Image (tube, helix red, strand yellow):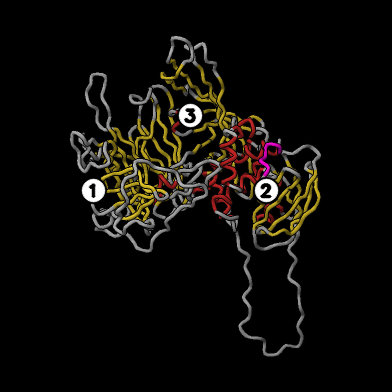
Amino acid sequence: MGAAVGRMEARAPAPLTAPAKVEAQVRRRPAATPVIQVQGDVVGVAPGASGMLRVHVDGQLVQQVAATADGFAIDVPASTSGMITLEYVQPGIHFVSPLGSYASLARMAGADGRLTRDDCECTRISAFSTALQHATETMLGRPARNDGEFRNAVRQAGGNLGSSATVLVRLAADPTLLPPSHDTGLALLRDRPAFVEYLSSTYYTLLNDESAALDLIPAAEMDAAGLPERFALVGPLLDVGRPTPTTALVVEHEGDALRMHAPSGSLGVSYLGHADGDALVMVPDGEIALVNPHHRCPGPGQLWTERHWKATGTVLQRQWASDGMEIWRVTSESEVSFPDCPYLEGYVERWTQFMPAFDLARTGLLTDARRFHGERALPIFCSTAGQHNGVPMGDCGYAVHRFARNGSGEILELGHKVDDDFQPIQAHGRLPFAWTMGTDGAMHVQAGEERTRYWVLDGGDRTALGVVHVSDAERETGYASLAGYSPMIRVGVTDTYGARTVPGAWGYATFDAITTPTIDSGASEVRILRDTSGRSVTWEAGYTGIVERWTTAWGRLYSTRYSRPTCLAPSSECRPEVVRYFRPLARVGDRIHGIEEMYSPGGTDIDGNVLPPAVYSRPQFHERREMPEGVEADGATRPYTGHRTLPPAGSKRGGEQSAGLLRAD
């Protein structure tokens, strides 16, 4: 686990001058780079099937042989550059496996020059390996140029792998499902508009019950005794260089068992488990259940009934292992029942996702106390037992932590940034904490009852670093924990936003991070256009949508969405529906990292009393983009259209970073 670092071969410099006298010159051939023999198999095709096996380097065919799916051997010619892929083709099926660079293959093959599944799961050509190659090409818009770029693309594409692999499994099993215009599942996947049309015309039946299709792809072998002391499985990222929040699981040894800290969907309950063959079988260490009282019951005279959901377990399997990179399959299972409606039968839900794995012991170089000294924005956790159905722990926001060198610290500016009328106010709440570097290599922060551990996994853009975190505490109901991945923002500037710096076209991290499984790369055209009059609109693919009014206070940005798009200020007819607060913390070029808080009406309690505004807090960045064509330079936009449309199929993200830097007003 953990990312391996590629090595470049050193070359001796050529002499600057020729020798004064040369009696004789002996030409020596450079040492031959050995041919690597790849030995593997193909899964997902009929036993004994035969086809053509091909080796490509940077897309160029360099070797091909006839082969059977049950087992093959093929030589990879010596190469010092280029990314190598292995392809298997037979009528109706085209599978690919990314092998990596020649240097990577040589490291894994070792002295005997043979690469087998004991060295790399990449020697097994399957629907999963094909989905992996396709997903990385989709994210990059082209094949990866080196091992590092491939690994980063894998981390971006994780959310697409399951759906892509499902499509390939089912079309390989029954090629008659293919439309006449495409002869393999991979050809259909690569033709995005045709694939979208195919899914729509077949009512997305190809993607039904993905877990059942993915079960047909064998998992990689796993030696449970060789598992790291603790490791993290991390969900898909927007960009390794621009970290944004995503899901994460952390598994660590606890005596003879394993404990898994899960994200917020676990309701603060961790899992305990053990190794069972090639899998880790985890079960909740407490009840994880929800009740929806407003589910429709089809029976006569009964309109509504309760829907009960209960998590029953999670199975972790290693799916891919290649030169320091691992991808795990996470299959979660839950039960759904309708105890008060005899007309509805209960059922079992299964959901599978693929997540890259990282040995947290290898984060030591980045997880250094000096990286935390000063002011750093990090997530905070607290007891939510009185707020969310008795859930013992929740994500309670994102705030600046001030780390003193003596092991003490404070969390700053806690509290609402708007009053009950949704007008800007300042918050002065503080919470002390103590910190220390733990023997597990993590930064430990004890704030109240909650202990949070942070491992710095990614260097990000040096201002925002990607951290894996686990928060835990002992509650009256038992042990509670939550895991995740978030940026840690180094506070570098204050009062960035003023009247002269706000107008223009801006991309938001939360829009860029939206992905559509299988059919989209996750790139976003959404931009927020702010003009000098204090008006902002959401723009996408030529259409404007949500209208807000913006203002600044104390260097912070406040954007208010009213009940009517023509409203300029609160009144009896103009009610604030959402206020988006943004505190800038640091900037990198045209990117401003900060804390976003979204406020909405809190409703009333059972006695009719008006509750304070509800708030949701998260890290965010604003990034200046090019102004869309036809929009004035000051951000003036066409009239409000009253609706928002999605960009056309195949559209790409618009707006590169402009050359100008943001400056304080």
* Alpha carbons under labels 3 and 2: distance apart: 35 Å
Mark 1–mark 3 contact, CB under 8 Å? no
Q: Mark 3: which secondary structure?
A: loop
Q: Is residue 570 left or right of residue 271?
A: left
Q: Disc 3 designates what residue?
A: 270
Q: Disc 1 designates what residue?
A: 551
Res 293 → quadrant: top left
Task: State the image coordinates of residue 97 (x, y, percent, origin top left).
Answer: 67, 48
Task: State the image coordinates of residue 402 (x, y, percent, origin top left).
Answer: 31, 46
Q: Is residue 493 visible?
A: no
10 Å crowding of disc 3: few (<14), some (14-19), many (20+): many
Task: State the image coordinates of residue 230 (x, y, percent, origin top left).
Answer: 53, 39
Badge 2 or badge 1: first in the primary sequence: 2
Badge 3 or badge 2: first in the primary sequence: 2
Q: Disc 2 designates what residue?
A: 97
The residue located at (57%, 33%) in the rendering is 203
The residue located at (25%, 24%) in the rendering is 604
* Alpha carbons under labels 2 and 1: distance apart: 52 Å
Q: Amino acid at mark 2?
A: Ser
10 Å crowding of disc 1: few (<14), some (14-19), many (20+): some
Q: Is residue 26 left or right of residue 510?
A: right
Task: State the image coordinates of residue 21 (x, y, percent, origin top left).
Answer: 70, 90
Badge 1 or badge 3: first in the primary sequence: 3
Res 220 → quadrant: top right
The one nearer the camera, 297 or 449, is 297
Q: Is residue 470 left or right of residue 230?
A: left
Which image quarter is the N terminus in?
top right
Q: Is residue 278 left or right of residue 413?
A: right
Q: Residue furthest bottom?
A: 21
Q: Which residues are magenta?
A: 175-180
Q: Is residue 650 visible?
A: yes
